[in-house]
């Protein structure tokens, strides 16, 4: 079965398998479940890698030892869920400071629109005139879109 791994994935898999063998100081045929657990513990606690990096290491080891060497021990490892990071919430003073630091009226309007509507930058750049709901008579949005040039 042909796998369509990206070059980046291949590099990461090779890196994690090489680091694992370096860490365990064993031949790839002699490693055990305990070696894998110790390595993952080392990554999580000593190196404090993210959940996504840890999952990549697990996938790399599962692929090599499970798919290539047909070993079963690696399948006992469960993947971690991604870390859920809360968004940074700015204080009213910080928002005011940001808005007052911008001199260009168009840029200020964009920032005000982003902040007031809770939009992402990718959502702002996709705004079109039809996005303005005239039924709601949202004059503030209409003025902002006019100033921005949408």
Image (spheres, rainbow, N blue to C red):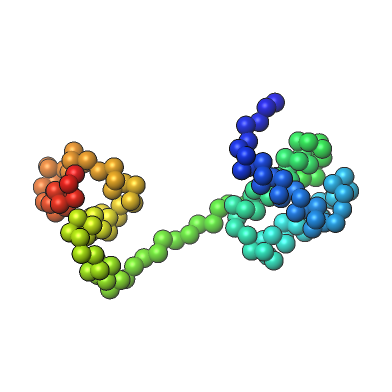
Q: Quadrant of the N terminus?
A: top right
Name the residue nearer the viewer: 145 or 65: 145
Q: Position of residue 150 (x, y in %)?
A: 19, 44
Q: Position of 108 compared to 24: left or right?
A: left
Horizontally, residue 67 falls left or right of residue 82, namely right
Q: Residue furthest bottom?
A: 93
Rendering coords of residue 71 (x, y %): 82, 40
Which of the 4 quarters of the picture holds residue 65?
top right
Query: Does the image show residue 140?
Result: yes
Relative vertical location of residue 37 with respect to residue 4 in this rendering, above or below: below
Q: Evaluate whether residue 79 shows in this view.
A: no
Residue at the (69%, 60%) spot, across then down: 43
Q: Report the number of numbered marks.
A: 0
Q: Is residue 108 left or right of residue 31?
A: left
Q: Is residue 19 above or below residue 48?
A: above
Residue at the extreme top: 1
Q: Quick one: 149 or 134, which is closer to the camera? A: 149
Task: Give the percent coordinates (x, y) of residue 96.
Answer: 25, 70
Residue found at x 62% / y 53%: 53
Q: Residue at x 75, y 48 (%)?
A: 17
**Residue 116: which quarter of the image?**
bottom left
The correct choice, above or below, for 107 with respect to 131 in the image is below
For the residue pair 10 and 135, the one nearer the viewer reads as: 10
Residue at 10% across, 47% down: 137
**Residue 121 at x, y percent in the picture:** 33, 51
């Amino acid at each position: 079965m042909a796998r369509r791994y990206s070059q980046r994935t291949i590099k990461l898999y090779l890196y994690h398998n090489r680091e694992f063998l370096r860490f365990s100081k064993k031949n790839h045929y002699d490693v055990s479940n305990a070696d894998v657990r110790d390595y993952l513990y080392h990554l999580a606690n000593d190196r404090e890698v993210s959940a996504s990096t840890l999952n990549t290491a697990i996938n790399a080891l599962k692929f090599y030892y499970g798919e290539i060497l047909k070993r079963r021990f690696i399948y006992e490892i469960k993947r971690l869920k991604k870390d859920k990071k809360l968004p940074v919430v700015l204080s009213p003073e910080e928002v005011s400071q940001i808005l007052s630091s911008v001199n260009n009226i168009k840029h200020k309007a964009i920032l005000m629109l982003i902040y007031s509507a809770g939009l992402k930058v990718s959502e702002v750049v996709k705004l079109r005139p039809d996005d303005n709901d005239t039924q709601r008579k949202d004059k503030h949005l209409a003025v902002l879109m006019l100033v921005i040039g949408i």
